[in-house]
Structures are given as structure tokens and as C-alpha cells.
Amino acid sequence: MSAKSSNRYGIVVVQVLMVILLLSSLTACRSSFSGGEEASSTSQPAKITGGTTSEATPVVTRATGQIYLYGEAHGVTKIMDKEYEAWSEYYHNKGMRHLFMEQPYFTAEYLNLWMQSDNDDILEELYQDWEGTMSHTPYTKTFFKKIKSGCPETIFHGTDVGHQGDTTGNRFLSYLADNNLTGSEMYTLTAEAIQQGLRYYRSNDDVYRENKMTENFIREFEKLGSESIMGIYGSAHTGVDQMDYVTQSVPCMANQLQKHYGGNLHTEDISRIAKDIEPTRVDQISLKGKKYAASYFGKQDMSGFRDYVYWEFWRLEDAYEDASKLPLAGDVLPYDQYPMQIAEGQVFAISFTKIDGSVEREYYVANGKQWEGREATWQLKVKE
């Protein structure tokens, strides 16, 4: 699958990339917390900027707590387990109580109500509202129930734009109205989050969303003074040196936060845990007449693409020395399109099964070369 050629591979890859972008695909993994410059001691207003689609908003940053952000792949069980372990450690051993999440303001407030309730009705309603999203997996409910049981004083903070505004958002507005809270800050911020969501979905303006996520985060964090927090966000938003994933035109949320909080911001990308998988079997595949053990990592659906049904992935063991002598075809496949982790010095066979039953196979090598700043494998020119 080429990210360069103008033939069918280029078309398919562009479509795959679009899907990955919409799902906030994974960014490069960091093996440990990464910080930045020292936190600024100034109390002068700082501005969030980011292109012509978002207003520059003055924000005074006086909070002095630490920020620990975890970059995730959404809806993955073992990632949620890692996040719960981290939160439990901060909660019980560091005395932290505030957990920031990539959810709208009103969703977090509903979760806070649920934390005080004696049943799971609110959680069940939220779960139904999440249908069609990557949060709509049964283990998401297990994750929140573990927090309620093991860390019962947790306070959730939602800083995303108003996803599910027509369901969760409007229902929360009704709850506030029924409890004579129409003049409260909660009502104002809920209405504001709903409007943010409406604007975002009208224009699909990812620059606007990234900037609003940052602005909302700062607003919530500044309420806490010297208290430290943990945050759970898609890894596309947590790289301190990264731009927004979709347009690459403005700093991502964590990159912007670093300019406000410097060394008080720490990030760890745990998204690649999702790709920490073992092969399901070992086959044999021949490349240029030589047989190699081929670790099989499964197939992925391609039914949304014209003429294709699925593609399958193998890693050819101990093939790099031979493969590195072969010429390159010039086409590439970025690391993030594989279902497993990729390392330099590996060789891959990928088969594409078409609707007519025919199968096409291509070979790729991870030779350390990047493509447009992204880690990528490069297609080998192979004629069997």
C-alpha cells in the first residue's frame, strides 16, 4: 500500500489515513514521562493562539500543581487497566483527587453525580450515549466502576468540546434546571460546551477543537491552585513537541499546555500497549526463493474500499540481511497502519484479498528511513 504512488495503492492508503485521522490515530510512543521548560512564574495573561479559526483567549495561569498526562488509544482494555493502576497510585500514595478526561464538561459532571449515587443508572445512560464511539465497549463501564469502588473521592473534569451535546448535554441542562441551577456556573459551562460541540461538528474544524480543549483544560486546572492532576487523552493530544494530528497547523493540546506550565507538565504515551500483541501462528513464506518463518498477526477489514475485502500481516523472521540488499519500490506504509509494533530491522509480507478472490502480496522493510516525518516501512521491489 503506497503513500506516494498514484495507482490503487495510493488511493487506498489515503483512505486508510483519513480513517485513522478521524479515529485520532496513534502518535509515536514515549517510554517515560517527558517534561519541558520550567513553569513560568508570571501572572500576566497568556494567549492561546492557533490559526484563524479560533479566537485568541487571554488566560491567566497561576496554578502550581503538577500535570501527568497519559496518551491512550481509546477503548483498549489493557490500556484502561494501566490507567487505573496509575490513577490508583496517584490517588492513594500522592493524595490526588482530580482526574481530567477527553470528555465534555457535562459528561464529567454527570460522572461526578454518579460517583455519589447508590446505583449505576447514570453510568448506563452515559454508556448508551457513547454508542458509535470507541468508548462504547463494555470494559469502559468496568473501568469507571473500578474507580468508584477503589478511588471513591475521584472528581472528574471534562475538557473536550461538547460531543453528545444533543443527548448527554441537553439531559444535564434539564437536570440543572429541575434543581434550580440555571444561574450556576455548571449551567453556563454546560451550555458553552454544547455550543463548542455544535461549532466543531458544523465545520469539522480540528484547529478549533484542539484550541478549545487547551482553553477548557486551563480553565479547569486553574481552579485547583496547587493541586496536582492526572489526565487521560488520546495520544494525538499529549505530545509536548507535536502539532495537531489532523491539520499539523497548530500545536496540540499538550504542546500548548507546556508553554503555560513548563516543567510542571509530564506526559507518557501508553497507546502502543494496544499493539503489544503476539503472533497467532507461524507460517512459512518464500522471498526471492528463500523460505522464512513468518509470524502471522491477523487480518483487518477493507470492505469499505473498492475491490478489497481484507489485508493480512506477517513478519518475516531473520530476513533483514537478505531484504536490505533488494531495491526499494519507492512506496511506503507508515508504522501506525500495522496492527502490531514495528521495529527497525524487520521485514513484512502483506497480502491484499480482493472481492474477486485474487490475492496480491507486497513486501516491506523497516530500514529506519522516515516518510514526511513519520516512521514508515518501505516497499521492496520483488519479482517472484
Image: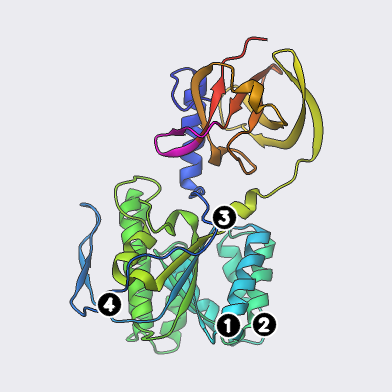
Q: Measure the alpha-carbon separation of dots 4 and 1.
A: 24 Å
Tell me if residue 128 is in the magenta stretch: no
Which circle, 2 or 3, is nearer the viewer? Answer: 3
| On screen, residue 277 above or below 34 | above
Residue located at (67% from left, 82% from top): 150
Q: In the displayed image of the protein, which residue is found farthest to the top? A: 383
Instruction: Tell me residue 48's x, y (percent).
Output: 25, 64
Segment colored magenta: 367-375
Q: Which residue is mark 2?
A: 150
Q: Residues within 10 Å of mark 4 (few under 14, many from 20)?
A: many
Q: Amino acid at mark 4?
A: Thr
Is there any visible trace of residue 265 in the rendered image?
Answer: yes
For this rendering, which residue is in front, 128 or 271?
A: 271
Identify which amino acid the numbered label 1 is placed on.
Answer: Tyr
Q: Secondary structure at mark 2?
A: helix
Pointer 2 or 4: first along the chain: 4
- Callout 4–callout 1 Cβ contact below 8 Å: no
Quarter holding residue 165: bottom left
Q: Is residue 345 left or right of residue 171?
A: right
Specify the farthest residue to the left: 44
Residue with the most extreme bottom position: 180
User: Against 376, is 206 above or below?
Assistant: below
Residue lying at 81% horizontally and 29% vertically, measured from the top left? 283
How far, Cα to Cα, is label 3 from label 1? 22 Å
Q: Is residue 283 above or below residue 77?
A: above
From this view, report whether residue 222 is shown above or below residue 319: below
Quote the CA–CA distance across marks 2 and 3: 24 Å
Which mark is first along the chain, 1 or 2? 1
